[in-house]
Amino acid sequence: MDKTKRLQTNSDFVFRKEYDDWAILFNPNTSDTYGLNPIGIFIYKLLDTNHSVGEIVNLLQSNCKNVPPDAEGIVDTFLEDLVAKGIAQYRGQVLS
């Protein structure tokens, strides 16, 4: 993934943080639901088009403990999964 690309969340999804520090994303139009762990929440909240993929990785490394050396690849995979599921999109992309 291009480190300079910026992503944004799909506004169709409702974000709800649960009592156990996990979160649920729910799309009322399709009834799709997805769970996010605390690291997923951290990344998801940065999908505001103000942060590039590279900046997200840097923020993760500077704000979280025990970040694995291959964090960039893991974040890329996670973000691509969010895009594939329609939860996030690249800035300027129109979802169908």
Image (tube, grey):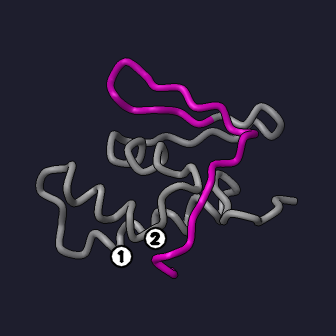
Q: Quadrant of residue 29?
A: top right
Q: Position of residue 12 (x, y in %)?
A: 75, 39
From this viewpoint, which residue is outermost toward the front? 50
- Assign a secondary structure to mark 2: helix
Residue picked out by circle 1: 73
Q: Measuring 43% from the left and 22% from the top, which residue is drawn there?
A: 18
From this viewpoint, which residue is outermost toward the right? 96
- Assign a secondary structure to mark 1: helix
Q: Quadrant of residue 72?
A: bottom left
Residue 77 is marked as: 2
Q: Amino acid at mark 2?
A: Thr
Horizontally, is 78 left or right of 88 in the view?
Answer: left
Residue range of the region highlighted in magenta in the rendering: 1-25
From this viewpoint, which residue is outermost toward the left? 66
Query: Do the numbered discs 1 and 2 sit on residues whose CB atoms are within 8 Å?
Result: yes
Q: Measuring 51% from the left and 64% from the top, which residue is drawn there?
A: 79
Q: Position of residue 63 (x, y in %)?
A: 21, 49
Cα–Cα span, label 1 and label 2: 6 Å
Q: Is residue 33 above or below residue 43?
A: above
Q: Position of residue 8 (x, y in %)?
A: 62, 54
Q: Amino acid at mark 1?
A: Gly
User: For the residue carrying disc 2, how many other residues have a C-alpha within 10 Å: few (<14), some (14-19), or many (20+)?
Assistant: few
How many numbered discs?
2
Nearest the eye: 4 or 90: 4
In the rendered image, residue 14 lying in the magenta stretch gets the answer: yes
From this viewpoint, which residue is outermost toward the top? 19
Horizontally, is 94 left or right of 75 in the view?
Answer: right
Residue 96 is marked as: none
